[in-house]
Amino acid sequence: MSGTNTRSVGARLGLALLLFLLMTTPSSAGILDATWTAPVTNTDGSRLIDLASYRLYYGTQNAPCPGSSWAQVASPTSSPGPNQSLSFRLTGLATGGLYRVAVSAVDAAGLESACSNLASALARAEFSLSPAGPVNFGSVSVGTFADQTVNLTNTSDGTISGTVSVGAPFSIVSGTPFTLAGLGTSQAVKVRFTPTSAATVSTNLTVAAGGGTVSAVMTGSGVAGDSLPPTVAITSPTLGPAYTTTGTSLTLQGTASDNVGVTQVAWANSRGGSGTATGTSNWTAAGIGLRLGSNTLSVTAWDGTGNTGTATLTVTLSDTTPPTVAVTAPVAGATVAGTVSVSGGATDNVGVAGVQFKLDGVSLGAEMTMAPYAVTWNTTATADGPHVLTAVARDTAGNTATASAISVTVANAARIDGTAPTISQVSLSVTSSGATIGWTTSEPSDTQVAYGLTRSYGSLTSLSSTLQTSHSQAITGLTPNTWYHFRIRSRDAAGNLTSSGDFRFKTRR
């Protein structure tokens, strides 16, 4: 007590401490909860009416009071009543350290009482960090990362807020800043180790909260990145480097392996097309489209660090199927004269490369490389009489096929004139399933009718090659109650063809 006032406070000042040790790991996050009984009289026995505050002295020495380490605690009243208890929490202490505490009272004039009795206890933790010991991330490849989780737990009955920090090459992914409200509440903190070199490193993870800190060692080893490529092999349809097939689609199968694991297998065709195989260690690539000739198929495997390994197979698509071909005009047995069109049709499983028409075994015009396949034949350069027309189709693989030959008669000398016959007196008789069409021509001509559901027709009756002027042509197999289009065709002996305009009729119900 300093000063000359004979009325000093603290005649009945006592101190009790309720202290607990919750964690023995040394840190600066320890706390002590101190309680004491407020004084009620001055040293002269008079009633205390001007109490202002308390000084809570603490330290690790035997006699901390008076001393340089103390906390100022305001008094809730200037005149405490009997047995009034007060409490205050000291923070920032070394967890597990033995502290000695005493308290003094200060009046409104700044006069301080003598120190109370001395109490001691071990500082307990305000929060805990688990695991408290070193956290080892093990060996991690340079350029990759590994994560570990530590947990913060509130070991006091209050609310704690703080932050978590760590040095490079470690980093905090989540969990900071944090607030823990109430005893037992916890917060997970995710820590990431991202090595930048092949070395072992250690650093402290520091938790700062409530005026104190807790640290834990983080350690890990960086190892050189994986540079080994995967090994990939094609095992089906062959183990060899080349394969020949006649199918336009192929399935590959094989294996892949890597020191750290295969993540993906994909294929590509040098002629076009690519895709992802199913499976990794044992993979399948189905539905690979092939082009005629040589196809280089590449299968590539990836590992987790981006290294790749590739296997190739050269596949030859061999086409042995010949095309089909037919001469479609003129029709077999026709008599032709002047200039006529010779046409045909051709198909192939891969593709038609060209059609060459032939007259009596000799090429007629140039090869036609695109549909429609047709050439013009000037029959005046050919002797009158019978001749044979055919066509040879060639596919892209070089396979060929020859159309069935048709015979025609060239009759240029027998032509009366170059005038086509005239059609007249068209008549029509219709039933539910057919029709009979009649007409006359100005000179003897053959008989034929084109018919169909549209003006494109699409169907021809059989040609009646008998030359006559009165014609009748029956059409059968029609649908009841349906409209049909038809056109009359007649050709004279000189080969002059005439066609009527478009006619329509509707079959009966």
Image (cartoon, rainbow, N blue to C red):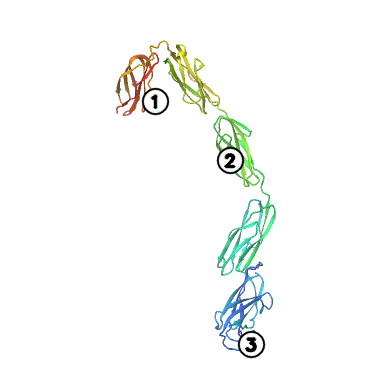
* 2 or 3: tag closer to the N-terminus: 3
Residue under the point 63% across and 38% down = 311
- Quarter of the image with the C terminus in it: top left
Q: Amino acid at mark 1?
A: Gly
Q: Secondary structure at mark 3?
A: loop
Position of residue 128 relative to residue 101, above or below, is above
Question: Badge 3, how many Cα within 10 Å: few under 14, some, many 20+?
Answer: few
How many marks can you see? 3
Residue designated by label 1: 458
Position of residue 259 relative to residue 465, above or below, is below
Q: Position of residue 289 (x, y in %)?
A: 54, 34
Question: Badge 2, how many Cα within 10 Å: few under 14, some, many 20+?
Answer: some
Residue designated by label 2: 266
**Mark-to-mark CA distance, 2 and 3:** 96 Å
Position of residue 302 relative to residue 429, above or below, is below
Q: Amino acid at mark 3?
A: Thr
Q: Nearer the viewer, mark 1 or mark 3?
A: 3
Q: Amino acid at mark 2?
A: Ala
* 1 or 3: tag closer to the N-terminus: 3
Q: Position of residue 479 (x, y in %)?
A: 34, 28
Residue designated by label 3: 4
Q: Residue furthest top?
A: 413
Q: Quadrant of residue 251?
A: top right
Q: Secondary structure at mark 1?
A: loop
Residue under the point 63% across and 54% down = 146
Q: Residue furthest front?
A: 418
Does the CB distance between marks 1 and 3 fall below 8 Å? no
Q: Quadrant of residue 254?
A: top right
Q: Nearer the viewer, residue 330 or 279?
A: 330
- Quarter of the image with the N terminus in it: bottom right
